[in-house]
Amino acid sequence: MLHQVCLKNVKMTNFSFKNLAEIKIEELRISESTVLGLDIGDKTIGIATSDREIKIASGVTTIFRNRTERDFKLLKKSIENYRIGLVILGWPLQMNGLAGSQCEKVLEFAQNLSSFIPGDLAKWDERFSTKVVDNLMIQADLSRRKRKKIVDQSAAVYLLQGALDFLNHSFVK
């Protein structure tokens, strides 16, 4: 895959992302699991979750990061009442489609996350997610202060909804 070519500085372990096309959505529904969506930034983590039918994404919260184990404990606390069967991580590809330094950061985060949260981890192209959400909030005439509070959570909803739509479309075939 192209993204592995650019990931030079990440120490690879046995961790790997699940291919979203291979996810069996019906198994998630039978187990009454939900899907978690994470928009991982340098300063914040936006969190969204699906309904039990795995069709609709909803925002949960935003965590302000300090890049320690505390981030994972806060994340785990934020989602402990959800039965997580799959975690979708926003995969911040560059405009040319290659993975860059932000993908390295997400991969490192995912490697650490895999020991804190049950379920498979998959990635979803999140290019433009924050920008699209920010533009929608501007059109809705939200103030900059209000936008700042919810933009990362909303970006997590946006990327998770895209992944859910993909999963549901794949299941129909």
Image (cartoon, grey):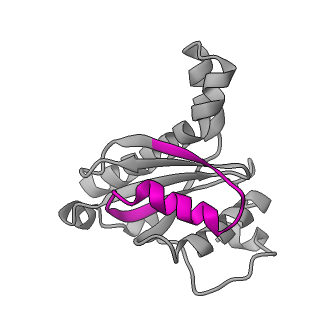
- Residue at x 38%, y 46% (from the top left corner): 165
Nearer to the camera, 61 or 10: 61
Residue 135 x %, y %? 63, 24
Q: Does 24 appear above or below 127? A: below
Looking at the image, can residue 48 be seen? yes
- Residue at x 63%, y 37% (from the top left corner): 130
In this picture, residue 22 sits left or right of residue 144: left
- Residue at x 64%, y 17% (from the top left corner): 143
Please tell me whether residue 61 belongs to the stretch shown in magenta.
Answer: yes
Q: How many marks?
A: 0
Residue 108 x %, y %? 68, 71
Residue at far left of view: 30
Residue 54 x %, y %? 30, 51
Residue 32 x %, y %? 22, 60
Nearer to the camera, 28 or 71: 71
Screen quadrant of the N terminus? bottom right
Please tell me whether residue 41 belongs to the stretch shown in magenta.
Answer: no
Magenta region: 60-87
